[in-house]
Amino acid sequence: MNFINLMSISSLLATNNIENVEISDKPKNVPLHWSNVGVASSFILINGFISFWLNLRLEKSLFISSIRCLVQLTIMGLILEDVFKARHPFVVMTMIFVLIFLAANEVSYNKSRKRHTGMFFSVLVSLTLSTLTIGIIGSRYALSQVPFWEPQVFIPTMGMLLGNCMSTVAVGNSYALGQFSEQRENIEMYLAFGASRWEAGRPVAVEAIRLAMLPIINSMSIIGLISIPGMMTGQIIGGAPIMDAVKYQQIIMFMISASSALGVLTTICVCVFTCIDGSHRLRTERITKSKPWIYAKKDDLISGIRNSLCCGKSK
């Protein structure tokens, strides 16, 4: 009996040791410091070396983009900490509308060389309707969030929807506005033969939407086969179960696809009906490269600073 008791005790101790080993083998989240960010930022020197070696003249752009990345993400992190602590729907929705406003501003005045009359307002409304509709429905029913505005899920989800929808809308608008200028004679010929403004502008709209949606379709076709997406990677690093991370990423990709399609569809329709008026005339004078005075002043200020720095170096 004593021998049997000793054997049972030893087996229990061995089992506990195995469990302890399994627990200790699980990866731990290592706290990161600003020194870690400094080490990673040194990788930008590779880009700078390539730019300098090939005379790409991207050194200033790389430096400015790197500084913006550090500053903007730091500010975003500080704001998100307070928003998550507040956990109030008004605070969450206010931040969402601020993000939508900034995204519409980026599309209209920074990512587009050409813009049509009222483009900022149309992009703002389009991004609001497409991302909020898909974001609210997806968060509530696909991600099973109650309430749907849970900040730790809703805000990052809306950020991903806005980022992808913004790029899609910018590509579609840029192509459509370029075609209205380049294909002016063909479009006017269609209108002269009795085509309505939608019939004349439909080929441009279809090609613009198709071109804008191609990156989303391509990313869905290679995701999980060639690339591991950022959200899935972040959840795995954060310690979430792998299959939960996979399901989250699948849901987000389908939400991105739907919101991008709705966003580019509405903005391209507004673009067509703006550039071709109700009297079925092509109005290319509504397409301009000029920016509002505040952006023009900002560009002049940046150009003045660059010129002064160049003159100072030459002296």
Image (tube, grey):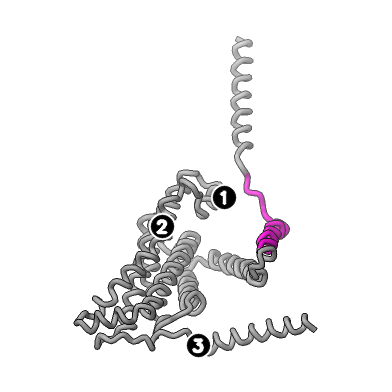
Give the CA distance from mark 3 to mark 1.
43 Å
- Find residue 52 and report its horizontal and vertical position in percent: 69, 66
At x 55%, y 87%, the residue is 296
Q: Which mark is residue 181?
A: none
Q: Residues within 10 Å of mark 3 (few under 14, many from 20)?
A: few
At x 40%, y 84%, the residue is 287
Q: What's the magenta bit mostly, secondary-structure-wise?
A: helix
Q: What residue range appears in magenta?
A: 28-50
Q: How many marks?
A: 3
**Label 3 amino acid?**
Pro
**Label 2 amino acid?**
Gln
Element marked by disc 3: loop
Element marked by disc 2: loop
At x 45%, y 80%, the residue is 114
Query: Which residue is denoted by mark 3 in the rendering?
Result: 292
- Find residue 26 and report its horizontal and vertical position in percent: 60, 39
Query: Which residue is denoted by mark 2 in the rendering?
Result: 145
200 or 262: nearer the viewer: 200
Q: Please tell me whether residue 152 is drawn above or below residue 110 in the rendered image.
A: above
- Of the two numbered discs 3 and 1 in the rendering, the one whose residue sits closer to the viewer: 3
Q: Quadrant of the N terminus?
A: top right
- Find residue 211 and report its horizontal and vertical position in percent: 38, 65
**Label 1 amino acid?**
Gly
